[in-house]
Amino acid sequence: MFADGRFGYLEKVRFGLGYVTTPVYWVADIPTRMSFWFDDVFVSRTDLLEENEQLREELLVAQQELQLLESIASENSRLLALGEATQVIEGEVMPAEIINVSPDPYSKRVLINKGASDGVFLRQPLLDANGLMGQVDEVLPYSSWVLLITDSHHVIPVEVNRNGERALARGSRTTSTDLELEFVTQTQDMLAGDLLVSSGMGQIYPKNYPVAEIISFFADPGQDFATVKARPMAQMASTRHVMLVFASDETEEVAPLDIEPPAVEVAPDVSAQPVTGDAQLTEAQPVVREPQE
């Protein structure tokens, strides 16, 4: 051993024995390597499952945040359009929000979050960014019910924006989303696609604000009036942000003028004097205008 340690006589022998004993080491190491392999496989699968679950939760949160951002962007665009629409309205406006819809199928009303405490009054007009929606039908302390223009009991004076033809628009009795024009003669100039705006008559709705678009015009020779249907411009079923209109106060008080009344000469009373002769005939004779040749 001393000679082998000093001079390395058995180095080749040990090298050959290494070839012989290598399979023994491999076989002896199989349980350890199998244990490590199983640990890696199962631990990796568990980690992947946990990571997958975590990523799924993060994806759901990200989708929810994305939907929220899209909702906020859509709401901002609607508010921007509503703000632009207020520029064409004379008078003050107050923003409101639709918070409920009437459950009565025969009454088309919505509930807004403004009431008597905010200065809301009966028959106050309600608009959205696209057109007229209706008028306040019932005022509560902190909310109000609004009768929509699509209700069959609601009538609004309108005119064709193209030529000024006037009519009355009533909520359709057959459909829940359209309007019908009443007392439209067959000779009136109305076409499908014409824009109907508020005429301002009745002093409820602001003048020249969009109301509806004519979708059909049918004239039956056997009927006195034509059948005209229109679709409201306002987004009745989807919009939430609306505005109430307060009429502009253009009347100004005028101070009375300090002017002395002119002196009036009193004429003698001649009613008691009898009328005779030609004068009596002149008063009784009617004035007749002859046609000019």
Image (cartoon, rainbow, N blue to C red):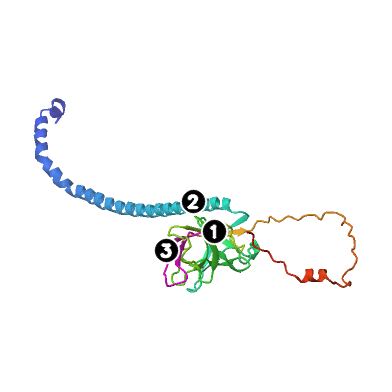
Q: Decide: marks 1, 2 in contact (CB < 8 A)?
A: no
Where is 20 relative to 52, above or below? above
User: From mark 1 to mark 2, how far is it between C-alphas?
Assistant: 13 Å
Q: Earlier in the sequence, mark 2 or mark 3?
A: 2
Tag 1 secondary structure: strand
Task: Name the spot of residue 130 as percent of width and height, x first.
Answer: 50, 56
Rendered residue at 90%/60% (across/down): 265
User: From mark 2 to mark 3, how far is it between C-alphas?
Assistant: 31 Å
Tag 2 secondary structure: helix
Task: Name the spot of residue 172 as percent of width and height, x first.
Answer: 47, 69
Give the residue type that dot 2 points to: Ser
Quadrant of the frame with the N terminus:
top left
Examine the image and state in which quarter residue 272 appears. bottom right
Residue 216's disc is 3
Asked if residue 185 shows in the view, the reply is yes
Examine the image and state in which quarter residue 140 appears. bottom right
Quadrant of the frame with the C terminus:
bottom right
